[in-house]
Image (cartoon, grey):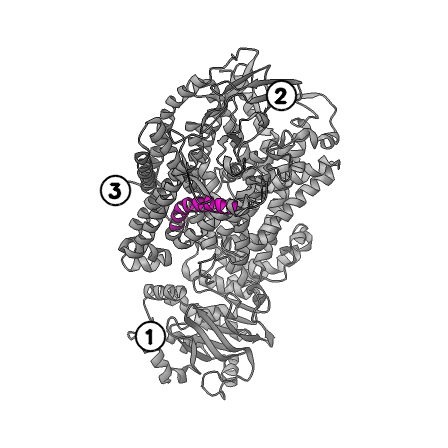
Amino acid sequence: MPHVATTDRPRRTRLLIALSMLAAALVGVIGLQAESASATATAAAVPCVADAETGCIGGTLQNTAGPVEGVTITVSNEDDDFEESATTAANGTWAVAIPGRARYTVELDESTLPSTAVLADTAVNPVEKLAVAGASSTVDFNLVLDATPNTGGSSSTATGTVTPTRLLQQFALGIRYGLILALAAVGLSLIYGTTGLSSFSHGEQVTLGALLTFVFSIQLHWPIVLAVLASVILSAASGWLQDVILWKPLRRRRVGLVQLMIVTIGLSLALQYAFQFRFGGSTLQVLPSIAKSWSIGPIRLSIPSYIAMGCATLVLVGVALFLQRTRTGRATRAISDNPALAAASGIDVDKIIRLVWILATGLAGLGGALLALAFNGAAWDLGLQMLLLMFAAVTLGGLGTAYGALIGSLIIGVVVEMSTLWLPSSLKFAVALLILILVLLIRPQGILGRAERVG
Amino acid sequence: MSAELSSPTPLAQTAAQALAGVSPEPGVAKPDPIIVADDVVRRFGGMTAVDVRHLEVQRGAITALIGPNGAGKTTLFNLLTGFDKPNSGNWEFNGRRLNGVSAGRVARAGMVRTFQLTKALSRLTVLQNMQLGATKQPGEGFFTSLVKPLWAAREQEITTQAEELLVRFKLDAKSDDFAGSLSGGQRKLLEMARALMAKPELVMLDEPMAGVNPALTQSLLGHIQTVRDEGTTVLFVEHDMQMVRRIADWVVVMAEGKIVAEGPPSAVMENPAVVDAYLGAHHDTDLGDESVMAEGVLEQLEAEEATE
Amino acid sequence: MNWSDLLSLTAGELIAPTTAAYALAAIGLNIHFGFTGLLNMGQAGFMLVGAYGFAATAQAGQGFPLSALVGVACSVVFALILGIPTLKLRGDYLAIVTISAAEIVRLIGRSSVLSDITNGAAGIPASRFNKDFLGLSVLPDGRTALGPFSYANNVGDGWWTRIVAWAAVLLAVLLVWRLMSSPWGRVLKGIREDEDAVRSLGKSVYGYKMQALVLGGAMAGFAGILFVMPASVQPDAMGRSMTFFIWTILLLGGAATLWGPVIGSMIFFVALMFIKTVMRDVLPSVLRPEQLEPLAGILVGITLMLLVIFRPQGIFGDKKELMLDVR
């Protein structure tokens, strides 16, 4: 493994170089975006041209199945008594001409949506938008494919009676989400265990995996297996790069944990906005075609979902074996237990921590890729939503214990999906976070954690 | 002040006299105990860190708590001061039950401790550190703090008291410096002075001499005796038997969580149980040695103890 | 590029109600983190709770004083609920719980469950709750120009809101000054340095941490009210990014300093507006309009990282008193 660190150069310079490398990486992302910009430009061929007096509000309505046609969208402004509607065209585009600078309310009429499309849980409707004359403003509604047409329609409200079939279906969805969540959470837990750091940028590592899968699979037309593999390798490489240019120099400077945590917050902000900058605000399809579903008894999931679950299980078992059976794995656990003692007994703590960063980001990348496959969608805020669930899973299982993170993840996954049987699905994440707070109240050390010694 | 170590002060003699008739055996009753502890047990996982059947600490005397590393001295300290909770047991301070009482309340009851690894409040000045040690400052309440006249007078008293103590501990020149800029020994002094701000009945010093250079050790010993002579009971943890011999009126020896011996310093040194306890734990340890162990080794062993 | 436009736009940010609201929230966070060392990662949640409490009461026809009181009281209750289980635990538990609780409030706010009160994801427009507040204005109706600043007097985004907002900020600074130079503030700073030491000196650390959490949370609650006054209560505008922006502001100005949060907020918003305006004018061929916000966000993130690494004491802070622990 190449070592960038050169001890004779002053640390400050090295850090500056490191950060400029990071900036360069961001510029790379910006460079890549030229392609996608032209792609949207063609899509936005709409009957509205901005000039000195008028502006345009428009967008493209699509979900993972493709453009959505015939949906009514109304743009209004209370103060100016302005109201204008548009209907989406065959390619999903719509536009409304507006009189001038004002704050407009853009509302999608949900009753005009076709049966295969629903607004995502995270979608905002209506949208408030500040628009000006002489420019085109884009409003995107986050639509998703209605994934459960045969189990009783939209899942956005808690409807009907809870049948055993629905229970099993939701449980299966919960295990699917829990397994994928576990991939990310185990990494977060390993980082916490070895360095004491709660990494707020771990969610973006998940997003990175998902979006890279999109780039390889859709933009570069790679076979999906290769696309996932490449995403995982690049994700792991991002962890290695981070440790080389950021975390190791900061460890050398003996930067405090709180400080490090805020650095991860900054990194999280920079990355999530970089994703938004490069890929826009909507959900991107990662499979070239809509996948078929399989039924096992009452459970019906898409084929990629089964593959994702199998893949996640295999990798998690592999990680467990690695931690149990290999010398390096045992060293990792030793550092989690007692860093000072581990260092004293000849373990190269720096090397193990680097390995943990690579492993953790690689696992998060895999989690992101599998999530994108299972839901056939990747978006800039995918990991952002997941981060708090990871924290919940890790805390539930006991901070810093890898197995706890696994069990915590499965519990959180099942709770999140099954809560939709009784509660609106927009609250499913809230339920998981509420459980987190309750667990802290009753058993702060988590399920598998040990009680802490004071003093 | 620190030069008269060899000639015992009158109060020292009374403390020694009071303990003269007490037989040197573990768990023995004292004529005027300030602490009485019974069946205090603390386990970590499968290991029993502290298992004290009965312990009494004599009022007005300097009692040393010694024992090899891992003997449970610091854990016992943590338990008595409310920083850790025992699996079972109860104890009284001045006749008042203190088990299950929070650390803050224990301190307010008149039992103030220091820490083995000094806890100077780095980004407060030395004077602010001292002021924080004082009690009965109405300005520490949220609403009263808003009206300065309600607390300005008491603040003046506190400041005067702090300045006097700083002079006594030779820290007055550093009064306006950040505590973080002090040397290790100065921090020990500051922590001891800060504990005295509350005018406690009992000060519990956790290894006050660890990591302090010999010159400062002399003055620390002097300060401890002065504190005793002013009527404050002192209980301290120490490794160095030489230091213990010079200032302690009574010595309690712990090994593997239990009290294995008690008595006046000279008697305890010759007790075979004590020699066993030390030799059993660390063969290279010479009891009378000026520095029992190199500092680094000490810290490492303490780190081991802390993670048990 | 039109320089006078650029100047008036950026200067406008200096006194904007949003700037004041963020400054007030940052003052609250300064009490939490700067003076007491509490890792509150959900300051936006405190603001949102305050804003909802206020807007719901005002919507129901109550006057501004009572509504504002209810809003702040909601934030206080929120602080108590979060503080009780976590303030006895290690610091990072508070971080995880506050960020989660803030997210719960946002998710519930934007869901359909309480849409009678919260109006779901669309949020509550200001016209439903700011009439009584604007009615309290001592200013005559109309428009006032003062140098580069020209606003209507009695509209949501007008002079009256600005005056009240900045008066609140000044009052908060004064309060912090009084408290932090008192023995009460000394205990807080002691807890920040080492809570076990303070405990050993007989102080009830838990009680002090709770007082600090409640005080800073109450300030955030009022900041939330100020924030929504010009526009609307938008749950999605008051999420994690808002919390992180407040952190950036605090670290920019310097934690544990008196004026740091205020100056930090001014610098933050002026710089942000400046950058956005310049980019809009200079780079229209490279950037799509919707890419401006993300680009600004990227810059905020990088700024936060650089600040924490190279100037943890903030732009104006003293190196010796640097806030973040360098172990």
- Disc 2: which residue: A76
Q: Earlier in the sequence, mark 3 or mark 2?
A: 3
- Image location (x, y in percent) of residue B47: 41, 71
Instruction: Farthest residue to the front: give it.
Output: A297
Q: Main secondary structure of the magenta part?
A: helix
Mark 2 lies on a secondary structure that is strand
Q: Which residues are magenta?
A: A166-190
Mark 1 lies on a secondary structure that is helix
Please tell me whether residue C291 belongs to the stretch shown in magenta.
no
- Image location (x, y in percent) of residue A251: 35, 47
Residue A90 makes an appearance in the image: yes
Instruction: Determine the image quadrant of residue A333.
Output: bottom left
Query: Do marks 3 and 1 share a subunit?
Result: no
Q: State left or right for residue B107 relative to residue A287.
A: right
Chain under disc 1? B
For residue A3, the mark is: 3
Instruction: Determine the image quadrant of residue B48.
Output: bottom left
